[in-house]
Image (cartoon, helix red, strand yellow):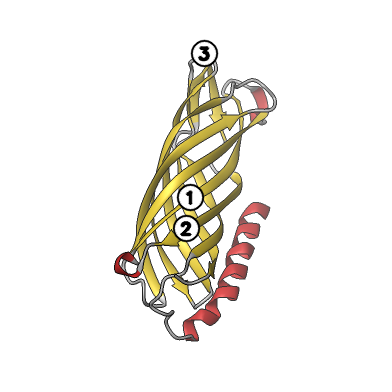
Amino acid sequence: MILTMSRWCVTLLLAGMALPAMGQSPPPKQPNAFVLTIKTGDVKLADDSQTIGGNDWSFERSATDVAAIEGETRLEREAENLSLGGEILRYRNPFRLASAPGGSFSGTLYTQALLAKSKYYFLPGSAWQPYVGGGFGLVWTYDYSAPLHSANGVGYQGVVGMQLRSDRVGFRMEYMALRARLTDDNGGKVDASSHGLFVGLSFFFGRR
């Protein structure tokens, strides 16, 4: 309950900071040299019951401490619809043995991703900018309490979203899906795939 309220508070704060953009004129035609976006959201594991290392584990489906930071740049004016950049994403999910009495969680699986991304903006010259995108990169999971081994592998991400922006500040909401089937130190499989809804605040710097 507290986590849900916290996420809504963050959402409302970001929206309140970005809503003044609705009354401003569309941004200039020249693309910004760099865009920095800070995001949080409601992320859920695709598979919350997994067999790892010969044991059955149950994970909290809803992730906590969800945070992402993304940097991107638009291409020259002739291809302003297209952006290139990267993202760092992190979240964590408590877990326990499926057979554990009482159902209390005994550890936490931390997931981090470093992704190269590209997005296509359909209306780059307007205040409302829908977009789709995708990316790939490295994904890691680890557990400080040691029942699960560290795992890593290649992840693939898809996003679809909407951005509302002024000249220097923007608010965005996007749906993200991450496919990340990893291999741990002993050759076991860990599925860190997830999906969720994000909100973010963007800052636009420079001109080309």
* Quarter of the figure with residue 26: bottom left
> Whole-Å distance between the Cαs marked 1 and 2?
6 Å
Task: Return the residue at label 1.
Answer: 86
Vertical comparison of 24 with 171: above or below: below
SS of the residue under disc 3: loop
Residue 183 point in image, percent of width and height: 48, 22
First reached walking from the N terminus: tag 3 or tag 2: 3
SS of the residue under disc 2: strand
User: What residue sits 67% from the left and 21% below the top?
Assistant: 146
Residue 37 point in image, percent of width and height: 54, 60
> Whole-Å distance between the Cαs marked 3 and 2?
42 Å
Closer to us: 58 or 69: 69
Q: Amino acid at mark 2?
A: Glu
> Whole-Å distance between the Cαs marked 1 and 3?
36 Å
First reached walking from the N terminus: tag 1 or tag 3: 3
Q: From the viewer's perspective, is the residue at label 1 or at label 3 nearer? A: 1
Task: Return the residue at label 3.
Answer: 54
Q: From the viewer's perspective, is the residue at label 3 or at label 2 nearer? A: 2
Q: Pointer 1 and pointer 3: residues touching (CB < 8 Å)?
A: no
First reached walking from the N terminus: tag 1 or tag 2: 2
Q: Amino acid at mark 1?
A: Gly
User: What residue sits 56% from the left and 53% below the top?
Assistant: 69
Q: Pointer 1 and pointer 2: residues touching (CB < 8 Å)?
A: yes
User: What residue sits 61% from the left and 58% below the top?
Assistant: 7
Q: Pointer 3 and pointer 2: residues touching (CB < 8 Å)?
A: no
In this rendering, would 128 be left or right of 141?
A: left
Task: Return the residue at label 2.
Answer: 72
Vertical comparison of 67 with 114: above or below: below
The total number of labels drawn is: 3
Q: Amino acid at mark 3?
A: Gly
Residue 190 point in image, percent of width and height: 49, 26
Residue 177 point in image, percent of width and height: 41, 46
